[in-house]
Image: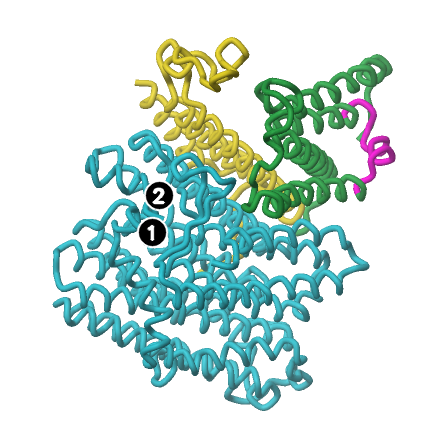
Chain colours: A cyan, B green, C yellow
Amino acid sequence: MSIPLPVFVALPLVMAFLLPMFGKKGKDAATALANLATVSLLVLTIISAIQLSTGNDQLYVYKIGKWPIPLGINLVFDGLSSFLLLTISVVSAAAMFFSIRYMEQYTAKSKYLSLFLLMVAGMNGVVLSGDIFNLFVFLEIASLASYALVGFGCEHEELEASFKYMVLGTVSSIFILFAVALVYGNTGTLNMAYISKAIQDAGLNIGLTFALALFVVGFGLKSALVPFHAWLPDAHPSAPAPISAMLSGILIKTLGVYALARTVFNIFGVSVSIGWLLIVLGLLSMVVGVFLAVGQWDLKRLLAYHSISQMGYVVLGIGLGALILARGGNTAWASLAILGGLFHLVNHAVFKSLLFLNSGSVEMATGTRQLKQLGGLATVMPVTRATSAIASASIAGVPPFNGFWSKLIIVIATVKAGFYSLAAITVIVSLVTLISFLKVQRYVFLGELPEKLRATEENKCSMLIPMIFMACLCVLMGLLLLIPTLRESILEPAVRVLIDGLKYSTNVMNV
Amino acid sequence: MKGMTVIVKTISSWVKVLIFLFGIYIVIFGHLTPGGGFAGGVILASSYVLLMLAFGREFVQKNLPLGISSKLDCLGAFAFAMIAILGFFYGGIFFCNFLVERGQAFGLISAGTIPLSNIAIGLKVGASLFLVIFSLSIFRRNTSANK
Amino acid sequence: MPYALCLLLFMIGLYCVVVKKNMVKIVIGIMVMEYAVNLFLVMLGFNAGGIAPIIDKTQYDPQTQQIAASFINSSVDPLPQALVLTSIVISLGSLALMISICTRTYEKYGTFDITELRRLKG
């Protein structure tokens, strides 16, 4: 492995420490350095993913400080980690490029760039970590940076949203720390591979079951599943637009769904009750999210409620795979369900961040986000209108865009597993999503241009390039599923990590 | 923020030097006795907070301007990252303790890069906590509300 | 038995976060929850009749580089203490951020009462 794994964490961290020294005069130099950092992270991630898929080993382990595994902290790079690292670097490169022009409205831009890079470093650390307390520390780094970024422009609503998000997020972090303490007390080690081996040898006692419940609550609150979703509709609209794209696009997936999947599949092992719990949580999120979203009149609040609903799809796919594995059913259908869930995760990252960048571009040009005050922008902002149409078609599941393929796989997996009513509910939720995005398109882009907005014009080039890039990804990502070589090099290793489940511990200990 | 009476000012200007020295002792001996970077950094910051309470905020702002402590903060963090990266170049792996063979056990110079990391962390934590408490003290309770 | 008291302290903190209406009291409730979890972590390393995990020259033999067996048997587990140190630093950072958001909210809204923060609805 030619790129040492701590580079993914150390590079944004060192840049984040350097940037506040620039102050107000060096703002352009600071912006250029930050963009260089995110683009080089993207290049390094692509190189590492290619090396992993063409190499012989299934995973790479990096021991920090040359300490052997149960004594020291290690970083693990396997198929699921490379999949999520690619998602993180693509979305963060696009959002950072968008914020060159967008963040001119705010003061203290160098502090914004530093917090952004801290959030990226935290998320990379969560994905790469092989030790459960290390995962908690990086989760806290990313969460604290995001609390500060949500309330960045200090207006009334942003501070209120930031306080709500902060209280709920800190309570969930305390639950996760309590669960880590319980796991350490019952197994005596903190390394994920060794914990998994201890649980396989001794079985689950009451302390470990309580720890699993606390993990589900803590990570579920980070990923905004339905009993724990109350912070998301306030936090995501109030943040600046590139931060909304990052929060909704990758933060809720990395801190929530990835950590939950890693804990349930690789450390504790699947069981029937956990599978049913995940399916119920996913179902509730899908239904509640979409029915609360249809009646919204604020553009970003509508998109935030749709985030809750689409995360329900992902957790439904993963929970269905867990249930089929735990019952001892056909592993082909289990891997199909998990493939649908993970593919929908990366699709949602791409089209939801594109939708939030579009709303930021509309807000920067017109100054408002309320649907009733907008209208007829199709003539004055053609690029924004085209990319928004592509993103809306993707999220609603219109073929041949990427959302259609992942929703199709999830529906096929539910039908094959025998849950016909779940499949029907999934299709109905998809139809209601289509209705609400038709509403968005009609109110924002079609219709006639009101008096106050006659003077709006299209945004500058540096805001359009990331939107066009993500729209091209939306169109082309269906090929990720259909071309066999791409599917086997990127998607299949991620699915295999979760299907193999408890073999993660033997793989790590044998390296 | 105004200062306090003459008695408090005299005594605190003697005591602050002792507190600062105690903080440096805890930072440097962090690999032999309990303490280390974080605890020593908090004590370093608290010596400046004592000064701020006794003499008033403007006096401390003249002595340690906000720009300098912000740069010290970044410098401490950057030094810690540099120790990790130097471990990569000299020892082959990040955070590798590449100085561990020098010196003898239980002396002041032993345990490789750990005292250097302690000094970097002590600098960063001291500067950060001082900045935090300084910025929070600008808040006044009786500003008028802008509803 | 001491673990049950830790859980009681955790529940008191959680009650404070859920019921109280003043922002500063909610922050204090979160701090009580953090103290409870830190206390639980430190108690995990307990060893009856144990000594502090600090080696000095009498317990270390430089010729063979061995630590005396009496030390290994009777010392308290030092790993949870390192975890608690990290956790205290994290809670300090999040406390600073929460207090600054509270003061800024007081400047904007004029009150610390959370039932008055009602601009985001629906």
| Residue displayed at 70% across by 57% down | A110
| Magenta stretch: includes residue B57 | yes
Q: Residue at x 53, y 46 (%)?
A: A141
Q: Position of residue A285 (x, y in %)?
A: 32, 60
Say what amino acid the circle numbered 1 marks.
Answer: Arg
Q: Identify residue type, mark 2.
A: Met
* Horizontal side, residue B128 vs residue A450: left or right: right
Marks 1 and 2, Cα distance to the nearest angstrom? 9 Å
Q: Are marks 1 and 2 in contact (CB under 8 Å)?
A: yes
In the image, which disc is placed on residue A249? Answer: none
Q: Is residue A306 above or below residue A121?
A: below
Rendered image quadrant of residue A421: bottom left
Q: Is residue B140 visible?
A: no
The quarter holding residue A275 reads bottom left
Q: Have a look at marks 1 and 2 and say if they share a chain.
A: yes
Give percent across and percent down for residue A21: 75, 51
Q: Quadrant of residue A104?
A: bottom right
How busy is the neighbourhood of tag 2: few (under 14 within 10 Å), some, or many (20 plus)? many
Compare marks 1 and 2 and give the one earlier in the sequence: 2
Q: Chain of mark 2?
A: A
What residue is disc 1 on?
A: A262
| Relative to A453, residue B23 above or below | above
**Secondary structure under the numbered disc 1 in the rendered image:** helix
**In which chain is the residue bearing label 1?**
A
Query: Is any atom of residue A397 visible in this view?
Result: yes
Q: Quadrant of the C terminus of chain C?
A: bottom left
Query: What range of the chain is rendered magenta?
Result: B53-66
Residue at the spot of label 2: A192
Q: Quadrant of the N terminus of chain C?
A: top left
Outermost residue on the front side: it is C63
